[in-house]
Amino acid sequence: DIQMTQSPPSLYASVGDRVSLPCRASQTIRNFLSWYQQKPGKAPKLLIYAASTLQSGVPSRFSGGGSGTDFTLTITSLQPEDSATYYCQQSYSAPYTFGQGTKLNIK
Amino acid sequence: QVQLVQSATEVRKPGASVRVSCKASGYIFSTYYMQWVRQAPGQGLEWMGSMNPNTGDTKYSEKFQGRITMTSDKPSNTAYMDMRELRSDDTAVYYCARLWEGASFDSWGQGTQITVSS
């Protein structure tokens, strides 16, 4: 199975900050990488797919980059509503594993 | 708009079985694979398996092989996930999700809480 590693498990940032959340795959996954945002009690929401394609309706302050094994979700100009847990997921080969998530706290 | 509506909360005893349903609307049901993902309390997301609603073909995570069955009913645009021999560590929220471009999961059901307790 491909292991997805997200670190740190939690992060504190302020409104207006730029943050970058890393995700690493245990082997190459080309660009089969998606990012999801999950708020408490809610289903995950797709933000980015194919490593860098912004899902329709997602604010442009979210962007994704990387390929192979190293990926990054970047959020510019943080907003209070960005407080959530962010998961990366590989869909290169089954089982389609998720990272453990990074909880983003807005100060 | 695409919508996935799941069945309600279930409580089961250890060793029992459960069925979760996921009714799709807003798109052609048979043309997109359906995924199932679960999330234990305070934990991350865990992929369980995938089903092609058109052919019935399935792919399950090895962890659940032999204990889950994914099926669909095309006339009612509904996907089902059956799980047997439930254990307390199967307590989780179970989600269905549509497989979309870039093999991403673009639409999710609201989640179904399954609690396994004696």
Image (tube, coloured by chain):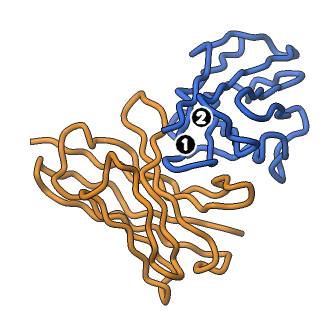
Q: Position of residue A12 (x, y in %)?
A: 69, 10
Horizontal side of residue B84 vs B112, given as left or right: left
Q: What number is the disc on residue B46?
A: none
B18 or A35, nearer to the observer:
A35
In depth, the one of A91 and B18 nearer the eye is A91
Labels 2 and 1 touching (C-beta < 8 A): yes
Q: Chain of mark 2?
A: A
From the viewer's perspective, tell me whether residue A59 is left or right of residue A45.
right
Whole-percent x, y for residue B14 in the image: 12, 47
Question: Residue sitting at 91 percent across and 38 percent down?
Answer: A60
Is A77 above or below relative to B100?
Answer: above
Residue furthest bottom in the image: B75
From the image, state the color of chain A.
Answer: blue
Q: Residue A90 falls in which quadrant of the image? A: top right
Q: Which mark is residue A39?
A: 2
Dot 1 falls on which chain?
A
As measured in the structure, the alpha-carbon distance from the residue carrying label 2 to the one carrying label 1 is 6 Å
The residue that mark 1 highlights is A42
Name which residue type carries label 1.
Lys
**B42 left or right of B65 in image:** right
Q: Secondary structure at mark 1?
A: loop
Could you say which is closer to the camera, residue A48 or residue A81?
A48
| Chain colored orange | B
Q: Are marks 2 and 1 on the same chain?
A: yes
Residue B40 is situated, as x and y percent measured from the top left of the image, at: 37, 36
> What residue is drawn where x is 52% and y is 50%?
A94
Question: Residue at point 62% right, 16% down?
Answer: A7
**Dot 1: few (<14), some (14–19), or many (≥20) neighbours within 10 Å?**
few
